[in-house]
Image: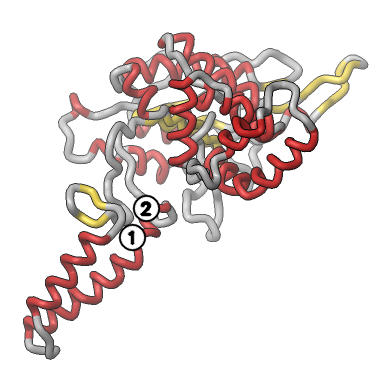
Amino acid sequence: MHINITAQKIGKNHQTYNSSVTDYVNYLEKENEGKHPDLQEQFFDQYNDKISPETVIDEIDGNTKKLKKKDPKFYSIVVSPSAKELKHINNDPALLRHYVRELMKDYAASFYRDRKVTVNDIKYYAKVERERTYRGFEKKVKANEPYRKKIAKLENDLAKINRGELKGNAKRTQREIDRLIVEAPHKIDGKILTEGMKKEGLQTHIHIIVSRKDVTNTYSLSPNSQHRKNVTVLNGKEQKQGFDRDKFFEASENKFDQIFNYQRAFIQKYNTKKLYRQDPVKFFAIVAQLPTNEKEMAIKTLHKLGIPTNKKGVAFKLFEKTGLNVPSIPTNKVQLAIKAFQKLKKGLDRAIQSGSIGV
């Protein structure tokens, strides 16, 4: 499960949206283009399944009382279940809507204010999407880029040769193009993978638009306000203020597991992310001692993330060979392991941040 919360971005330096939610709503409507109304995915909220785009725009844009010009008027929450999680619920959009409604209860409960916040205080609209496309910064697209550029040049040369504008052997040029396509590391249905192509497999996810203001348009509810850094004194007592993201992320995972009876492996858990950040030595030591089936899953996951899994660089093998145990780890062996972790840390950090492990 990967959940991402971002504020609306405003200004010329951002490639996103202006002060209105209109552009974002139109973007989320793209999958409905050309589909019969019965097959289109509709916006929904806590109690309604079918809400028009126009209503979403009017409600979000109209719920901004006393917000400053540069304040975000809404937040975007993107909920992306893993392929295994989607398969577990048969990729059912109705089940995902049910999950989002339960999730938003946890979202509300993660706010700390001078009063209890419930889901009925939150103004939000959500929409299920089934497709994703590759973007230019992704690893597969970048790996294909040198091949794509060479192919584009050769195709341009071939066109000129066929028009008589350039001397050359058309058949030889075409063979070179075919060779590059075969050698390109990433393809979909025989075509070289490029930016904008649809991703394979289950890609269903949910976009949630959440108003910055509560439903009464009275007070602000910002998930960017960290509760650990905001403490006020009320009636002589210190009281937390703000939003507890850690609490929300952990609750989102637990809620999915509870509702759908999903058995989450160690490597898939949100607490795995926290354990790595707090104690990477213990993280790899636990991986080394997992049951065989979970260890194999962990090995595959680490390998996909670019973490060395061969005899020359595998972290968990290091623990097995040195006999490290949890929770007692000899100091000299910890120091030995830490040197190996420093090389792994950068790659694993990026993987965790991208949501490949945890939320």
| Rendering coords of residue 268 (x, y %) | 50, 26
- Count the numbered circles shown: 2
Label 1: which residue? 144
Q: CA distance from mark 2 to mark 1?
A: 6 Å
Q: What residue lies at 36% left-to-right and 43% top-to-bottom?
A: 27
Snapshot quadrant of residue 161: bottom left
Instruction: Count residues near mark 1 (Cα–Cα under 10 Å), then give few for <14, some for 14-19, many for 20+.
Output: many
Residue sitting at 60 percent across and 46 percent down?
344
The residue located at (64%, 26%) in the rendering is 246
Q: Amino acid at mark 2?
A: Lys
Q: Are marks 2 and 1 in contact (CB under 8 Å)?
A: yes
- Give the residue pinned by disc 2: 140
Where is residue 335 drawn, in percent x and y?
Answer: 76, 41
Q: Is residue 249 visible?
A: no
Residue 318 visible: yes
Decide which of 191, 22 is in the foreground and name it: 191
The quadrant in which residue 45 appears is top left
